[in-house]
């Protein structure tokens, strides 16, 4: 019975998401997209720092 109630709750959530105004969905998508872009930029910066560090280590090796 508990599984049935959980399933019903998930269906209710899906119906709510489906019936949400498109503008709100777009706004939510853009927020997630911006958040992902921010993390992508941070990862690129960290990767660049790591490469610089490895190059410095290579230079100081005999």
Image (cartoon, rainbow, N blue to C red):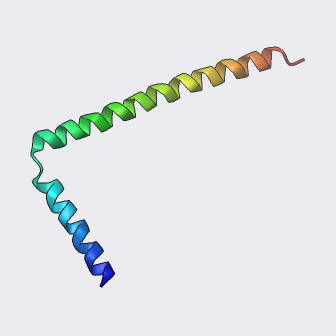
Q: Position of residue 40 (x, y in %)?
A: 44, 30
- Asked whether 31 or 58 is in front, the reply is 31
Up/down of 17 relative to 32, above or below: below
Quadrant of the rendered image containing residue 53 = top right
Query: Residue visible at 14% across and 56% down?
Result: 18
Whether residue 39 sits left or right of residue 46 in the image: it is left
**The N terminus sits in image quarter:** bottom left
Q: What is the tally of numbered marks visible in this picture?
A: 0
**The C terminus sits in image quarter:** top right
Up/down of 12 relative to 29, above or below: below
Quadrant of the rendered image containing residue 28 = top left
Quadrant of the rendered image containing residue 17 = bottom left
Whether residue 50 sits left or right of residue 38 in the image: it is right
Query: Residue visible at 38% across and 30% down?
Result: 37
Whether residue 47 sits left or right of residue 30 in the image: it is right
Q: Check the image and name the residue furthest to the bottom.
A: 1
Q: Check the image and name the residue furthest to the right.
A: 62
Q: Position of residue 33 (x, y in %)?
A: 31, 35
Query: Residue visible at 20% across and 61% down?
Result: 14
Up/down of 43 relative to 14, above or below: above
Q: Position of residue 54 (x, y in %)?
A: 72, 22
Query: Residue visible at 51% across and 25% down?
Result: 44
Q: Position of residue 5 (x, y in %)?
A: 26, 77
């Amino acid at each position: 019975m508990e599984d049935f109630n959980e399933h019903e709750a998930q269906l209710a959530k899906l119906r709510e998401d489906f019936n949400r105004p498109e503008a709100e969905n777009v706004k939510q998508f853009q927020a997630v997209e911006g958040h992902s872009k921010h993390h992508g930029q941070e990862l690129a910066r960290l990767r660049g720092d790591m490469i610089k560090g490895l190059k410095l280590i290579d230079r100081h090796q005999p």
